[in-house]
Image (cartoon, rainbow, N blue to C red):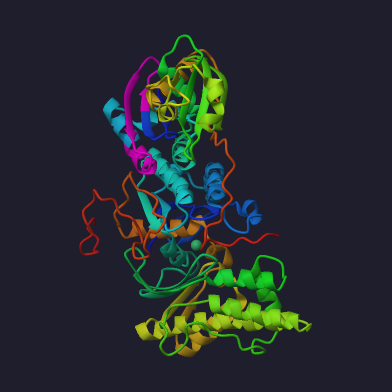
């Protein structure tokens, strides 16, 4: 890139779950990352209530856009495009963001880019470590996703290698923390206790790692049950539960499978880069083991800082900027929210544009 | 004055432009499941028809419901964001008031009722087309039958339940044209309109779907 001023200035809006995120980037440079979360309103229900999330998005949107513009120190009229998560996610929540993005883009006379939430989770790493290598292998792990994706071009070519067949990795952390009465949320507290425990104290099962199992899919439901049973058996026998060892051994089982499969996918596909994203990417043992195994295999590991790993608007802006830079077709004004947008669609181009037959840039 | 009015609180996706004297362009499409897709193209069409750009608009008027939430929010979010981008005021008007205005009844009382789904109606009573007496509220038709007995009624909610509303008639859905006209009249008279905040009238359903992010209680 030459002068960074030439890079696209894009505002991104994310409302697929309970965070109202508005981010602003210039090319691969992060300028603002404003997030309003409704997490506290959901806490008493034990999970995200879609209607509560949608109501909160409507209230938070305009103030969050304002905050992002101030933080970035840019004027809305200087934007080169507006990007928004078109899916996958909660339908009603997505629709609030899509409505805002369409109105904003239309009123400002800017192109609109409806983009994929999962591709955004990958693309956000450009804000931390510069342009994504092509191809990139990505491991996305959070309370909502656990997938292994291979991207040759984040704007046009994302292939699913594998995903969880039951629970997301983040859900398992929350469940085990609850069984151990460790307080909440589960991820950080398990991580903390595990540091003082022995990861080899208890041999918990590694899901889907048999010779006949699918090589890149995950399963955490069996592990969850095995750990809960082990704890209950101790309690039933009147013995004390070694919390630190259980936390360490459970965490080891999760990150062992995640990193083993990710590194294997890299090797099988001849990919020399692995990125890890999603909330669980904040786990220190996942980072350490991934680093160790990637080094041994000659793979470069890229993990963004935790705030960029969880849902945010900057990741959407990052992917939007890439769409602008690569002259991808903008979305049309009838863009809809698609709660099950396939991971293979990094964005939703408008139907009144020329078809992207060759995946080549048709507009330069 | 150039008002852009929109409403997505009923199955109609409806948009109108009002120059302070008359409605100069409007569009209404009935499709309860596609508010999100239809609204922006309708705004674009109405502006094109009037030969105007959005920048010319001096105020936004939006129906605040009550209405099914997902569709209702499309109009409100669009209005809010237009207001932010253009730096113009956004006025809210109760959607049922727009229907009452369109009903053009000089002497009431009469009822406006829209479909609230789940076998309920959103409803309000009016002394005349400009004066709301009670509501808006959400109820089962049978539960309010006594209170509305003998009154003429308009709106899809009235047409849907003839046992409760035997004197139901058109209009079925709200039109942005009548919202715009009502707003223009009120603004000219120096009246304050309400803030563009949704009239949900019900608490959110507290059901957590499977496979969605777990948020654990503190
Ligand atoms: Zn996510």
Left or right: A255, with A159 as reference point: right
Residue at image x 61%, y 72%?
Answer: A173
Residue at 35%, 56% (x, y): give it: A324
Residue B96 place in picture, x, y as percent? 48, 25
Q: Quick one: quadrant of the N terminus of chain A?
A: bottom left
* Residue B1 in magenta stretch: no
Position of residue B207 relative to residue B72, above or below, is below
Position of A257 relative to B196 (above/below): below
Evaluate whether residue A242 shows in this view.
no
The magenta region covers B16-41
Residue toward you, A21 or A109 = A21
What residue is drawn where x is 39% and y is 28%? B173
Please state, as top left, top right, bottom left or bottom right, where the C terminus of chain A lies in the image. Answer: bottom left
Seen from the viewer's position, the closer of residues B8 and A276 is B8
Q: How far from the left and from the top, in percent, is residue A254?
A: 56, 79
Residue B42 visible to an observer of this rendering: yes
Residue B18 is inside the magenta segment: yes
Q: Residue A43: x, y in percent? A: 65, 56
- On screen, residue B1 above or below A119: above
User: Which one is in front, A101 or A176?
Assistant: A176
Given residues A88 and A165, the one toward you in this image is A165
Q: Residue furthest front?
A: B163
Quarter occupied by residue B56 = top left
């Amino acid at each position: 890139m030459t002068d960074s001023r030439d890079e696209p200035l894009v505002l991104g809006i994310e409302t697929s779950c309970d965070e109202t995120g508005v981010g602003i980037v210039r090319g691969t440079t992060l300028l603002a990352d404003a997030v309003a979360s409704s997490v506290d309103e959901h806490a008493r229900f034990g999970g995200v209530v879609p209607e509560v999330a949608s109501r909160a998005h409507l209230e938070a949107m305009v103030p969050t856009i304002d905050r992002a513009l101030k933080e970035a120190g840019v004027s809305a009229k200087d934007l080169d495009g507006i990007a928004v998560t078109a899916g996958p996610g909660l339908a009603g929540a997505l629709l609030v963001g899509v409505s805002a993005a369409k109105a904003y883009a239309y009123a400002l006379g800017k192109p609109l880019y409806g983009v994929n939430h999962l591709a955004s989770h990958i693309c956000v790493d450009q804000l931390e470590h510069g342009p994504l290598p092509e191809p990139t292998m990505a491991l996305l792990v959070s309370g909502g996703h656990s997938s292994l994706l291979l991207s040759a071009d984040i704007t046009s070519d994302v292939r699913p290698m594998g995903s969880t067949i039951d629970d997301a990795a983040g859900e398992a952390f929350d469940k085990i923390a609850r069984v151990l009465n460790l307080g909440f949320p589960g991820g950080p507290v398990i991580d903390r206790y595990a540091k003082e425990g022995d990861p080899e104290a208890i041999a918990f099962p590694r899901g889907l790692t048999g010779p006949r199992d699918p090589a890149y899919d995950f399963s955490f439901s069996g592990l969850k049950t095995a750990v809960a049973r082990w704890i209950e058996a101790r309690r039933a026998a009147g013995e004390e539960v070694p919390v630190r060892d259980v936390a360490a051994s459970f965490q080891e089982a999760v990150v062992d499978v995640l990193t083993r499969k990710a590194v294997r996918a890299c090797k099988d596909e001849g990919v020399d880069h692995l990125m890890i994203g999603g909330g669980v990417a904040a786990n220190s043992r996942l980072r350490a083991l991934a680093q160790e195994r990637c080094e041994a295999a000659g793979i470069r590991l890229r993990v963004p800082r935790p705030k960029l790993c969880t849902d945010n608007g900057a990741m959407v802006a990052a992917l939007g900027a890439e769409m602008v830079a690569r002259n991808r077709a903008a979305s049309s004004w009838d863009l809809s929210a698609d709660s099950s947008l396939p991971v293979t669609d990094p964005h939703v181009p408008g139907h009144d544009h020329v078809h992207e037959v060759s995946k080549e840039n048709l507009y330069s | 004055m150039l008002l852009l009015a929109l409403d997505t609180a009923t199955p109609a996706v409806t948009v109108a432009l009002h120059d302070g004297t008359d409605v100069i362009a409007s569009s209404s499409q009935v499709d309860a499941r596609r508010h999100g897709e239809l609204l922006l193209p309708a705004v674009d069409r109405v502006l094109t028809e009037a030969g105007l750009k959005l920048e010319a608009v001096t105020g936004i008027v939006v129906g605040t419901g009550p209405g099914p939430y997902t569709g209702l929010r499309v109009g409100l979010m669009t209005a809010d964001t237009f207001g932010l981008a253009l730096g113009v005021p956004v006025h809210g008007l109760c959607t049922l008031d727009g229907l009452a205005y369109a009903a053009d009844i000089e002497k009431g009382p009469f009822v406006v009722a829209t479909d609230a789904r789940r076998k309920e109606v959103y409803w309000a009573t009016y002394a005349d087309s400009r004066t709301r007496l009670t509501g808006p509220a959400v109820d089962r038709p049978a539960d309010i039958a006594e209170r509305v007995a003998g009154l003429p009624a308009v709106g899809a909610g009235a047409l849907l339940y003839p046992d409760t509303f035997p004197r139901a008639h058109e209009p079925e859905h709200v039109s942005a044209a009548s919202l715009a006209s009502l707003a223009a009249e009120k603004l000219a008279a120096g009246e304050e309109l309400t803030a563009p905040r949704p009239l949900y009238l019900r608490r959110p359903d507290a059901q957590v779907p499977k496979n969605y992010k777990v948020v654990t209680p503190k």
